[in-house]
Amino acid sequence: MMRKQSGRRNLQVAIREEPTIAIPTELELAFQAHHGLVFRTAYRITGNAADAEDVLQVVFIRLLRRGSQVEALDNQGGYLRRAAINAALDVIRSRQADRTVELTTDLPHDETPELRRALARALAQLPARSAEVFTLRFLEGFTNPEIAEILGISRVLVAVIVHRTRQQLRKELGSYLGGRP
């Protein structure tokens, strides 16, 4: 009987090491085309590579469970970006519920760890749509018209969500913004 190995394997390693796993061609193509996008999106929200890898795996496992619907997705990149945002927010929310302390050493030097954690906590408290729009606008760099197209909502609604979300985040992050409202 073989002992279960300790440690984590990522999805890429698992696919290479487990040739008996039947991965649908569509899923493999989607992974090859979009794994970087999913990882970067998750990393911007979670702030560390380990959580971003977990999000990457969760997103593609969910896509695998969709089965034949993978190829039917009109905008795979948009779907996967949204899935990464939601999964990353779930990671942050679960971390808050567990009251665990993350040890991050891979933050960009121009951001303080405290500000990144505060922003992550504030994003996790937002409604899902608001967190998605904020992430797409300010962390991913999309314009309001691009966000409207990705999410299938009006440009006006995107602008309203951006405005309200910024106001709410200013209140919650006021101490990090020098006390400005």
Image (spheres, rainbow, N blue to C red):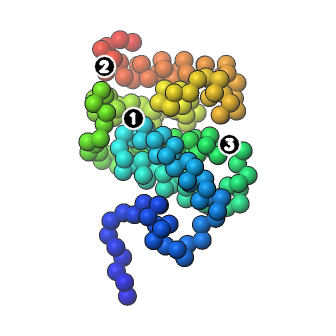
Q: Which residue is mark 3?
A: 75
Q: Amino acid at mark 1?
A: Arg
Mark 3 residue element: loop
- Residue furthest to the bottom in view is 1
Q: Position of residue 127 (x, y in %)?
A: 54, 33
Alpha carbon of mark 2 to alpha carbon of mark 1: how far?
14 Å
Residue at (34, 73) in percent of width and height: 5
Mark 2 residue element: helix
User: Of residues 85 and 128, which is closer to you in this image?
Assistant: 85
Residue at (57, 41) in percent of width and height: 82
Q: Quadrant of residue 105?
A: top left
Image depth: mark 3 or mark 2 in front: 3
Q: Is residue 110 left or right of residue 20?
A: left
Q: Which residue is mark 2?
A: 175
Q: Amino acid at mark 3?
A: Asn
Rate crowding at label 3 as few (under 14), some (14 to 19) or many (20 or more) other CA atoms within 10 Å.
Answer: few
User: Of residues 90 and 8, which is closer to you in this image?
Assistant: 8
Mark 3 vs 2: CB contact within 8 A: no
Q: Which residue is mark 1?
A: 121
Q: Quadrant of residue 116?
A: top left
Q: Determine if residue 70 is in view.
A: yes
Mark 2 vs 1: CB contact within 8 A: no
Quarter that holds the C terminus:
top left
Mark 1 residue element: helix
Question: Of callouts 3 and 2, which one flags the residue occurring earlier in the amino acid sequence?
Answer: 3
Q: Amino acid at mark 2?
A: Ser
Mark 1 vs 3: CB contact within 8 A: no
Alpha carbon of mark 1 to alpha carbon of mark 3: how far?
29 Å
Residue at (51, 23) in percent of width and height: 165
Q: Position of residue 112 (x, y in %)?
A: 28, 29
Question: Of callouts 1 and 3, which one flags the residue occurring earlier in the amino acid sequence?
Answer: 3
